[in-house]
Image: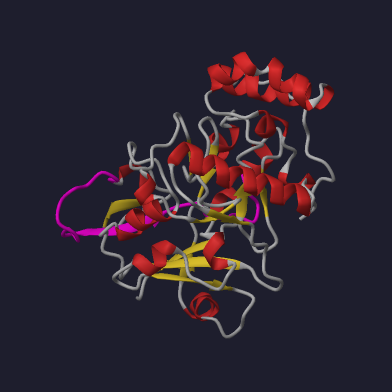
Amino acid sequence: MVEPSEPRRSISLPVLGSVSRRTAVKGIGATLGAAAFATAISPLRKLQGEISAEELMQRHYKELSPEDKAQVINRLENETKERFGADVTIDDPRPIPGTKFVYAINLSVCNGNGKCVEACHKENNHDRDTNQSYIRVLEMQKGTMDMEQANTTYDHTVPAEDKFYMPVQCQQCDEPPCTDACPVEATWKEDDGIVVVDYNWCIGCRYCEAACPYHARRFNWKKPNVPAAEINPDQGYLSNRIRPQGVVEKCHYCLHRTRKGRLPACLEACPTGARVFGNILDPESEIRWILENKRVYVLKEELGTKPSFFYYFDS
């Protein structure tokens, strides 16, 4: 994958009013001094909520030096304490060399219990009012793969007769249309296969959301509501730190866990063992054995997105 040397900055898009203002002042901040800029945006901060001058002037993630990144993380930790009343630690684990993470789900074992959805909700500090999650579990009619007929709001006892269940989340595509659609390169694919988002660079145009054929991206319409006692303090800059209003977010394979040798929260919560995660480049890994010995398939293969998320049945 070829990465641009510098993210594009100049755009003109029909985006939400508050977000377009936020984008415009990034360019202004580069021209004015910090003190003058802080004074100039004082009325704007009231319109946009709790967005600091430092955040509006912040450079793209790929342009941050280690010193810059340390200052940004320190600021975000302090802001989380001030705004949400919780002490958190924000880390920035980088991809592990020689690693390509992939996921697989055994649809013969998944029974639609939804524990993965709940775990994702808690692990990733999602807004409690909307009960958001990066995972949707589709209740499907046996004998068909017609996702348009699936039910995602079932509330009956599972598993139901003549039904099977298919969790869907970001497929971490090798050819992700979402990253191509972003006009400011706020989202990209990393060396370990994970597609990430720089929440402080995202302008909220939602082009990536529209481009994703798996409906895997979420837009923050309002400031997240997460009680201090429920905030997961173990956070990653590109993963589960509390996202600001007006940006798009998505599954990131719990990179704050997986890049440190742990498993995704959704996998640990699965009571049936339906989920398998690992490094496909490791010939001894369970995920490698499954892909070599099971009949696996990917969603919407005809689109050429080359997902790193697989499904299989026991028979």
Closer-to-camera residue (266/34): 34
Residue 267 quadrant: bottom left
Q: Is residue 256 above or below residue 25?
A: below
Q: Which range is magenta?
A: 151-177
Write the residue at 29% across / 71% down. Answer: 272
Q: Position of residue 252 (x, y in %)?
A: 54, 55
Q: How is the image coloured?
A: secondary structure
Report x, y in % for residue 141: 26, 54
Magenta highlight on residue 69: no
Residue 10 visible to an observer of this rendering: no
Picture layout, residue 131 above or below residue 298: above
Q: Residue at x 60, y 51 (%)?
A: 237
Specify whether residue 251 is in view: yes
- Expressed as whole percent of the image width and height from the top left, the position of residue 302 reads 55, 51
Q: Quadrant of the N terminus?
A: bottom right
The answer to which image quadrant residue 89 occupies is: bottom right
Compared across the picture, whether 178 is left or right of 264 comes to right
Quadrant of res 102: bottom right
Q: Main secondary structure of the magenta part?
A: loop
Q: Residue furthest bottom?
A: 284
Residue at 82 percent of width and 41 percent of height: 6
**Image height of 245 relative to 68, above or below:** above
Q: Is residue 153 magenta?
A: yes
Count of residue discs: 0
Examine the rendered structure and indicate whether residue 201 appears above or below residue 41: below
Please state the horizontal and vertical placement of residue 127, each as a whole percent of the image.
39, 40
Q: Is residue 169 left or right of residue 209?
A: left
Location of the C terminus (image quadrant): bottom left
Name the side, left or right, on which 168 lies relative to 241. left
Q: Which of 142 and 18 lies nearest the eye of the viewer?
A: 18
At x 64%, y 48%, the residue is: 73
- Front residue of this view, candidates 221 and 137: 221
